Image (cartoon, rainbow, N blue to C red):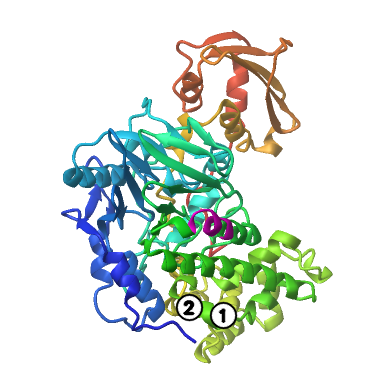
Amino acid sequence: MPADFADRTDYDNANRGLVAVLEPAEVRADGGRVVYDAAGFAAATDGECPDTVNPSLWRQAQLTAIHGLFEVTDGIYQIRGYDLSNMTLVESDNGVIVIDPLVSAECAAAGLSLYREHRGERPVTAVIYTHSHIDHFGGVLGVVDADTTVPILAPEHFLEHAVSENVYAGGAMLRRGMYHTGVVLPVGATGTLGAGLGPSTSTGTVGLLAPTVDITHTGQEENLDGVRIVFQVTPGTEAPSEMNFYFPDRRALCMAENATHNLHNLLTLRGAEVRDARNWSRYLAEAVEMFGYDSDVAFASHHWPTWGTENLIRFLTEQRDLYAYLHDQTLRQMNKGFVGAEIAEDFAMPPALDAAWHTHGYYGSVSHNVKAIYQRYLGWYDGNPAHLWQHPPEAAAARYVRAIGGIDAVVAKAQEFADEGDLRFAAELASHAVFAEPDHKGAKSVLTETLTRLGYGSECATWRNNYLVGASEVDGPPHPAEVSAAGMATALTITQVFDSLAIRIDGPRAWDATTSIRWQFSDVSETYRMELSNGVLIHYPTNRSDPADLVVTLTKQQLLGLLAGAGTDGIGLDGDTSAISTIVGLTDEADPAFPIVTP
């Protein structure tokens, strides 16, 4: 029972409540650089589906390209289509509450300006982060100043997880994110059509302000400038730290990113912690039980709302069943001895779920979500000892090429499989050929062809983006990450700042180096001990005054400046000042454009 292309309900809902659009529909940074172009996505998806796009993905791309300021219900508005995520604006007694201020300050500021143009110059009275992903907090400095005194609410452990993902693993994740979002591709029928979850990610200025109010438990109620909100914490769902919440006086339910109009990721292709499909389903059931029957509208941090109690309960229960089915059936087959790739290959969804458009894999996919569930329970090793100690890509590629009969034979075989329509195996063979001989023109040509054709056929937007960005880099320079997490530094705790330094230590170069520093922070009355030992930068808060090679007295802001190369003016130094240069000199820089489809 396939989904019905004649059903226009989603189009009606995506356009419902339109108040106004940005004119022109693009956002620029200081200096004129375009950081987001909504008009480009709208124009690219106008008309009939071309043969270079999966028809189902074309439909989703048309829906996510719809942009503007929309009224959700009385006193609740959304900015949609001006970044990957939505920004929601809830009118309060004396101003407006901002929920999820997009990826970048430029887009958030443009959205708030559009709102104020039509609803008045309301000051921001509070900010809410629904969860710890960058598209839900990165634009905060576009709606409030860095020294704001308004409350900032977030689920407990928000900062820990925001830093873990966007700073600690930020280099690798941002680079892989270029494949994931396709932001480097041209917008159009042979390039990117968005990410399924939204049009695309903006490339403006990212920042972070630390939360001032933690939401710690389900049922917690807060009153923000006259607006009552009841919270439901949902850790381990779409993010390690996430929450849904309900506006009882407006019968409106915010589902954060836990229920959107697609199958979401249990493990994103850019990389993340594996999410818990079982608990995700349970929290959706809890949301229906707590709030669903008293709600007239459900909205989320992506896509368009669902209106009507009966409709939103059906939507939420189908989403509930979607994640539970993936979880339970993967476990059932796993316990029969099937590995993740085997389970994913023939995984059939229930017909009633497959008939609902919002269960389709535009952002996540059944295939890689099943493998994620397998990974969550059993890890990377499939139990076959032959797979326990395999060669890394370049070494394996050389051996495959030798076994098949040389590079030309491998390329010919790859082309043969491509001509037969077996693009999956053609890409595998061609990739081995490129890793064995990176300059072989025939190998690069076949790999580019197969990745492009795989992209054109993908229903999942992130698969399409990965394939097409990969194809563009086979014979071209890698695209560096365009979004930086550097703007988050001021919100980090001192421990997180030191963690960020420790993970950059080049261990082998630091094996024989030793030094110690006592850091005394005058603004927060905290002291930390740091030791370089066995290639590891150890650091921890201390109440002791053990001897150290250097004692540094400073503020947290001076620490950030010091690590950024601002020098030591105004900083107290007592002892061997070379301790700092020793540590900094042993750090390594991440490569924002490391190769992925080539060695």
Do the CB atoms of the residues marked 1 and 2 lie less than 8 Å apart?
A: yes
Front residue of 557 and 233? 233
Between 127 and 271, the one nearer to me in the picture: 127
Q: Which residue is mark 1?
A: 424
Q: Position of residue 454 (x, y in %)?
A: 48, 78
Question: Horizontal placement of 373 versus 208: left or right?
Answer: right
Q: Give the residue displayed 83% in from the left and 69% down from the top.
A: 385
| Amino acid bearing label 2 | Leu
Say which quarter of the image contains residue 56. bottom left
Toward the right, the furthest residue is 385
Q: Residue at x 55, y 57 (%)?
A: 289
Task: Say few, some or many: other residues with alpha carbon within 10 Å of mark 1 (under 14 / 14 to 19 / 20 or more).
Answer: some
Q: What is the residue that sits farthest to the bottom in this orientation?
A: 420
Classified by dominant secondary structure, the portion drawn in magenta counts as helix
Q: Which residues are magenta?
A: 285-292
Give the vertical position of 90 relative to 352 (above or below). Answer: above
- In the visual, does 443 lie left or right of 202? right
Q: Position of residue 148 (x, y in %)?
A: 36, 27
Mark 1, secondary structure of its residue: helix
Q: Position of residue 444 (x, y in %)?
A: 49, 74
Q: Is residue 342 left or right of residue 569?
A: right
Q: Is residue 287 magenta?
A: yes
Q: Is residue 208 above or below residue 237?
A: above
